[in-house]
Image (cartoon, helix red, strand yellow):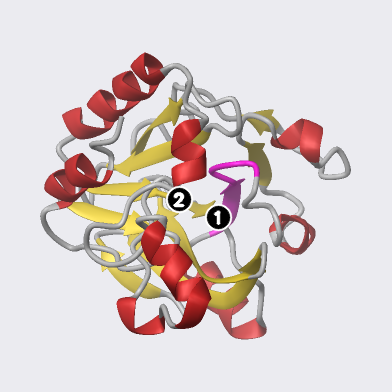
Amino acid sequence: MLQEFGQSLYIAEGPTVSFYGFPYPTRMAVVRLSDGNAWVWSPVALSDDLVDSVESVGPVRFIVSPNKIHHLFLSEWASRWPDAKLYAPPGLVKKKPELKFDAELGDTADPAWATDIDQVIFHGSVAMKEVVFFHRQSRCAIVCDLIQRHNEADMTGWKGWLMRLDSLVGEHGSTPREWRASFVDRRAARSAREKLLSWQPERLLIAHGECAQTRASEIISDSLSWI
């Protein structure tokens, strides 16, 4: 189920889910930390094969959600690995009080993974904040909904037309327009973008659409130029 995306970095494709009636493919990531433990980002629906594949990376110790709308499968992962710590992005603790989070993510990486992974929050939006990560060993930026590059061949009919209109399709995919409009403080968002680019990522891993093994900094600059 897991495929290697970079050194000590693996991805798995999940089922397509409906988001306000629009089909969204899902994707998760697993990092093998330098201490041998597994760090899980934006988990998808569990299956027996995926459990075996994830456990082959290492003991699951950390499960993180990058923004408050990526929570659909957190409960089943927390139940399967009760000893793992569950981390919420800003806004999710209030939205899903039934989930027992251990901590909320901030602009500074947790000491448990700071050696391997850096992070920054895109502040400035009145709608939603997203936590973006950088895996040092693979030189990979890990971005959730801020950059979407849906497959053009899958964007058919009126829904596909709307997705194209929203600049979410193809190699120049970007951030949903309605989310862009909610960034009332773009200075904060620009600061986060500058930090992301300062890491000089080579790879780009995203939840929705085509990832990239090269030119990550160039793609990020293009996709987030609206900021």
- In front: 207, or 85? 207
Q: Amino acid at mark 1?
A: Ser
Q: Residue 8: x, y in percent?
A: 31, 59
Q: Residue 223: x, y in percent?
A: 26, 46
Where disc 2 sits, the SS reads loop
Alpha carbons under labels 1 and 2: distance apart: 8 Å
Q: Is residue 143 above or below residue 29?
A: above
Label 1 environment density (alpha carbons within 10 Å; few <14, some 14–19, many ≥20) = many
Q: Earlier in the sequence, mark 1 or mark 2?
A: 1
- In front: 15, or 127? 127
Write down the residue under mark 2: 144
Please check the rendered image and state whether residue 147 is part of the magenta-colored stretch, yes or no: no
Tell me the residue at 50%/36% (across/down). 130
Residue 75 disc label: none
Name the side, left or right, on which 195 lies relative to 43: left
Q: Residue 134: x, y in percent?
A: 32, 41
Which of labels 1 and 2 is toward the front? Answer: 2
Q: Is residue 203 above or below residue 182?
A: below
| The residue stretch that appears in magenta | 59-68
Write down the residue under mark 1: 42
Residue 13 seen? no
Q: Is residue 152 above or below residue 112?
A: below
Tell me the residue at 68%/31% (across/down). 91
Q: Amino acid at mark 2?
A: Cys
Tell me the residue at 35%/56% (across/down). 167
Label 2 environment density (alpha carbons within 10 Å; few <14, some 14–19, many ≥20) = many
